[in-house]
């Protein structure tokens, strides 16, 4: 089996806070599989269920039904996350720590041996260009810098699978370029990247395959080239067509 | 265990980077110093009132430090969403909670070492005698009591959404137990029927924090507590602490995070 | 044009309002402040001062027992009168029952366990306190010195409620009797007398100080007589505590006069003592005894007098 990530018939319901409605269906019957070495773009309009799916993959939210596996291990097992890097969509990191300390803490959780640990921290900080600020508390960072810290912590364990929730949001054009480069480099190293994004141009350039989710349901899935050929339009037009957008 | 200690280290770091611990320590030192500079009837050997005052301040400070530190841990993890990158690491939720508990408990231990060192310095300077074992027993029993309290507040922080309400509840419960826990059985005697049964139930169920409050013994230089009883008290604290932490783990095990 | 002027005018108006308000408030707050500076505690605590004063007085007694003390939940029969006050002769001792076992038998295992973590023997500080109860204790100084530990609470109590006489009595007794601090005791008693002019109990204690510690019987006699006269001039049904103090004063005066050979005066004071003494018949025999020594005629007639 080559599938690094496998979702079958996933259904997630949230207990709704609105009156009269018992549950809110966030993901409905999603089946997906991502194989080794692929860069997979997970698309969909706001509220489509992308973050929810990722939350299931990381064990934050329990699936109402269906299964999700990473490296063939059920996502509820702690060990499933050993070779995984994750960048949440909106996060603040411990404000009282410096970037260096934060990464050291996470590296300890991955049981990276001490000797290797410092080298890894140096290399990821260099990658996200935070070396100058490494000894400053995170509370003094700008939004983009915090996003870079997030990227750094996702890469600290040299993961085989990266799950990134809107990695380029909040970054400047150079930062975005950098992220694109990082993704491409990881792909070159044979790693798998699963990420969500609203930047369709960027998705088109880096992704091998994409899936478009709408209202919790999978609408389109396939390789970027095939889809463009098939529909005779670019990704953005396809996206708008799938979600039923009509220009007024 | 590795994960537990890593999390505990972060909690300790947080405590000594925040200012409240220092503020309370300085306040204790200042108030005790001011009160110590008062002489009564030209007698400079009077010390027990000062011991009592200093210990009272230490107890209040330690309760404040312990409860506020642990009560904000999990809520702030969730509010700042730091829990997401954290739990995306190979760490189980139980390890996270135990790490939080341990970190806060150790941090309180460090704080107590500072506080009791000051206390010992004050008393030795006046009494010219260092009752090491007595102070050791008092400080460690105090620490184990905080262990129960931290467990309780940790559990509370998963039950009550707002950290401030949890802290307030824990503070009230702890004070109530310390003040009347010992006498609940007598209170029950003066009641009847269902009320009596309820108070008795409470009496047997609550963690008797007041056992660990041996301030009177060290203020008045009583002899040390017999070690078997000391050991039993420590065991008692460990059992209650473990009970609360286990409850917290159970509660948090399958909780959806969002 | 108008739109920019309006807020400016409003601002000026507001300033004027603020200043006039401040000018109006300032003298008032100053007056309040002066009032407060004379009596900070009074403003802060108001009427609860007496309650706190009592609390600290009892706390001093708890210290006297090294923390072995009944709470409101325990049997307090034997702690009705603070022992430090009873021992000092400052209050009439009304304690009864077993004082070492006010907690009773432990009612359950939790309570039994709890007893190992609280002071559990009855000791008095003037006899060495908790350390005196330790086996082979080396106190290194006179055991009575431990009593000093009750002093801060007594001082606090007196400051909170300057009209509480027992505080001065107890403090002075321990200061002069057990710690040799006669000057401090006198100063404190005089502070008490300033707050309670002519109080007979304070006069009695001050007299004792002169008699016992300064060997100045002349002043002792004056002070005691003053105290006794104050009580005798009071309205006939004397309060219990007044009776107790009158008995103290008259007996002390009688002893003083006896020791100076003024037997007639001594008999007079014993006659005052008799009605307020718990054992009038014994007093009577003492009076008879003194009369014998004076060579006066038989007291028979006086004895029978009330009967006729
Ligand atoms: N805790 C929750 N309780 C109830 N409903 C929720 C909860 N979290 C998300 N939802 C709902 O689930 C649906 C999917 O949300 P999700 O966050 O997965 O969207 P998304 O695809 O990540 O959107 P975006 O592009 O804005 O990040 C939305 O309709 C949202 O309102
Ligand atoms: Mg999202």
Image (tube, rainbow, N blue to C red):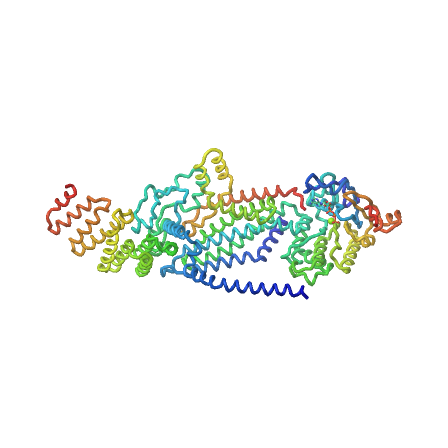
In the foreground, A129 or C30? C30
> Which of A75/B130 is in front?
A75
- Seen in the image, is B92 located left or right of residue C218? right
Left or right position of C11 against C103: right
On the question of residue B155 being in view, the answer is yes
**Does the image show residue C179?**
no
Tell me how many marks there are: 0
Q: Residue furthest top?
A: B193
Which percent across, then down, holds residue B255? 65, 43
The residue lying toward the viewer, choosing from A169 and A105, is A169
Residue C152 in the image, given as x and y percentages of width and height: 38, 56
Can you give x and y, in whole percent of width and height, for residue B113 in the image?
A: 51, 55
Q: Could you say which quadrant of the image residue A140 lies in?
A: bottom right
Q: Tell me what residue is drawn at x 57 percent, y 52 percent.
A: B69
**Picture coordinates of residue C265, whole percent (x, y):** 17, 54
Q: Left or right: A217 with respect to B233?
A: right
């Amino acid at each position: 089996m080559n599938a690094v990530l496998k979702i079958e018939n996933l259904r997630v319901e949230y207990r709704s806070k609105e009156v009269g409605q018992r549950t809110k269906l966030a993901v409905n019957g999603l089946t997906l599989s991502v194989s080794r070495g692929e860069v997979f773009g997970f698309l969909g309009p706001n509220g489509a269920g992308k973050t929810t799916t990722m939350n299931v993959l990381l064990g934050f939210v329990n699936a109402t039904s269906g299964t999700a596996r990473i490296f063939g291990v059920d996502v509820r097992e702690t060990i499933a996350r050993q070779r995984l890097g994750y960048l949440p969509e909106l996060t603040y990191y411990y404000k009282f720590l410096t970037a260096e300390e934060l990464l050291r803490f996470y590296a300890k959780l991955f049981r990276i041996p001490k000797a290797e640990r410092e080298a890894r921290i140096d290399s990821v900080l260099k990658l996200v260009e935070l070396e100058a600020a490494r000894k400053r508390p995170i509370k003094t960072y700008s939004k983009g810098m915090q996003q870079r810290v997030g990227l750094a912590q996702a890469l600290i364990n040299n993961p085989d699978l990266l799950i990134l929730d809107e990695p380029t949001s909040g970054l400047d054009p150079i930062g975005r370029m950098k992220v694109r480069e990082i993704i491409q480099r990881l792909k070159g190293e044979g790693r798998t990247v699963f990420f969500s994004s609203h930047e369709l141009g960027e998705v088109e350039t880096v992704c091998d395959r994409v899936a478009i989710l709408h209202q919790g349901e999978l609408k389109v899935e396939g390789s970027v080239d095939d889809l463009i050929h098939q529909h005779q339009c670019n990704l953005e037009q396809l996206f708008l067509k799938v979600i039923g957008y009509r220009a007024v | 265990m590795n994960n537990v200690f890593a999390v505990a280290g972060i909690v300790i770091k947080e405590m000594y980077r925040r200012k409240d611990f220092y503020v309370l320590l300085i306040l204790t030192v200042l108030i005790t110093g001011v009160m110590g500079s008062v002489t009564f009837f030209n007698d400079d050997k009077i010390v027990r009132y000062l011991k009592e005052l200093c210990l009272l301040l230490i107890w209040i400070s330690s309760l404040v430090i312990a409860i506020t530190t642990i009560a904000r841990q999990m809520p702030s993890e969730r509010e700042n969403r730091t829990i997401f990158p954290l739990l995306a690491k190979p760490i189980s939720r139980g390890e996270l909670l135990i790490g939080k508990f341990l970190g806060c408990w150790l941090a309180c231990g460090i704080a107590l070492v500072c506080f009791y060192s000051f206390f010992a310095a004050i008393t030795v300077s006046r009494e010219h005698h260092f009752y090491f074992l007595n102070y050791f027993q008092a400080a460690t029993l105090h620490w184990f009591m905080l262990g129960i309290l931290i467990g309780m507040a940790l559990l509370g922080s998963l039950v009550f959404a707002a950290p401030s309400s949890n802290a307030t509840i824990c503070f009230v419960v702890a004070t109530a137990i310390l003040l009347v826990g010992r006498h609940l059985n007598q209170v029950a005697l003066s009641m009847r029927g269902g009320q009596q049964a309820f108070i008795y139930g409470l009496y047997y169920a609550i963690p008797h924090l007041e056992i660990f409050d041996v301030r009177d013994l060290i203020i008045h230089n009583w002899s040390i507590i017999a070690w078997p009883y000391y050991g039993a008290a420590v065991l008692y604290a460990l059992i209650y602490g473990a009970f609360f932490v286990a409850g917290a783990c159970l509660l948090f095990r399958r909780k959806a995070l969002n | 044009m108008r739109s920019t002027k309006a807020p400016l005018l409003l601002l000026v108006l507001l300033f004027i309002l603020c200043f006039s308000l401040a000018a109006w408030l300032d003298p008032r707050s100053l007056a309040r402040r002066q009032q407060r500076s004379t009596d900070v505690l009074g403003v802060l605590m108001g009427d609860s001062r007496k309650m706190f004063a009592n609390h600290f007085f009892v706390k001093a007694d708890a210290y006297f027992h090294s923390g072995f003390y009944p709470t409101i939940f325990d049997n307090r029969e034997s702690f009705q009168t603070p022992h430090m006050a009873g021992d000092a002769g400052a209050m009439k001792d009304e304690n009864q029952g077993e004082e070492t076992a006010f907690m009773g038998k432990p009612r359950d295992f939790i309570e039994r366990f709890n007893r190992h973590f609280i002071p559990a023997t009855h000791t008095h500080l003037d006899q060495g306190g908790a350390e005196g109860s330790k086996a082979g204790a080396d106190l290194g100084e006179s055991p009575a010195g431990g009593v000093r530990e009750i002093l801060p609470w007594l001082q606090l109590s007196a400051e909170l409620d300057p009209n509480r006489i027992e505080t001065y009595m107890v403090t002075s007794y321990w200061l002069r009797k057990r710690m040799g601090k006669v000057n401090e005791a006198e100063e404190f008693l005089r502070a008490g007398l300033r707050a309670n002019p002519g109080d007979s109990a304070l006069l009695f204690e001050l007299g004792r100080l002169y008699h016992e510690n300064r060997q100045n019987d002349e002043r002792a006699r004056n002070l005691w007589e003053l105290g006794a006269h104050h009580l005798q001039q009071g309205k006939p049904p004397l309060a219990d505590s007044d009776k107790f103090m009158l008995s103290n004063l008259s007996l002390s005066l009688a002893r003083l006069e006896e020791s100076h050979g003024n037997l007639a005066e001594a008999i007079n004071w014993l006659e005052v003592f008799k009605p307020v003494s718990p054992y009038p018949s014994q007093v009577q025999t003492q009076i008879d005894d003194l009369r014998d020594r004076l060579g006066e005629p038989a007291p028979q007639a006086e004895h029978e007098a009330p009967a006729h």
